[in-house]
Image (tube, rainbow, N blue to C red):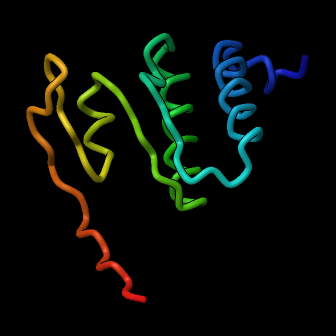
Amino acid sequence: MPPAASAVPLAFLAAFAGFAAKVALAPGPQILFADEPTGNLDTGTGAGIVELMFSLNAERGTTLFLVTHEESLAKRCDRIVRLADGKIMSDSGAAPYPEPVEG
């Protein structure tokens, strides 16, 4: 294996491959769901996956629905809804909804 390739953590490659495969199977998804995307990953691998998700979100204009316990990750989102015991405890609000089109 070339030195550059051996420097990439195997866990990142596995996580990236799984994530990329799911995105590839759904061309042009309107919503990207990510449930604790960094939960079982080391810091470096998690950061790579997070950057990939936000890049896809920005480049494709998709909605990113992210579930996390990581405050720093939540703060990168446009809207934060906090839940406790199955109830909404707070909602940072969303951008104003567009007016319905008559006709």
Q: Compared to 87, does 31 lie above or below?
A: below
Q: Nearer the viewer, residue 73 or 68?
A: 68
Q: Quadrant of the C terminus?
A: bottom left
Location of residue 28 in the rendering, given as x and y in whole percent from the top left corner: 68, 55
Q: Position of residue 97 (x, y in %)?
A: 28, 69
Question: Measuring 37% from the left and 87% from the top, which residue is drawn there?
Answer: 102
Q: Quadrant of residue 25?
A: top right
* Residue furthest bottom in the image: 103
Q: Is residue 9 left or right of residue 93?
A: right
80 or 3: which is nearer to us? 80
Task: Give percent across and percent down for residue 37.
Answer: 48, 25
The residue furthest front is: 103
User: Is 79 placed left or right of 43 in the picture?
Assistant: left
Count of picture labels: 0
Residue found 42% across the figure and 41% down from its top = 65
Q: Residue at x 71, y 13 (%)?
A: 10
> Which image quarter: residue 81?
top left
Residue 100 in picture, x, y percent from top left? 33, 78
Depicted 60 relative to depicted 33: above or below: below
* Residue 43 vertical placement versus 83 (above, below): above
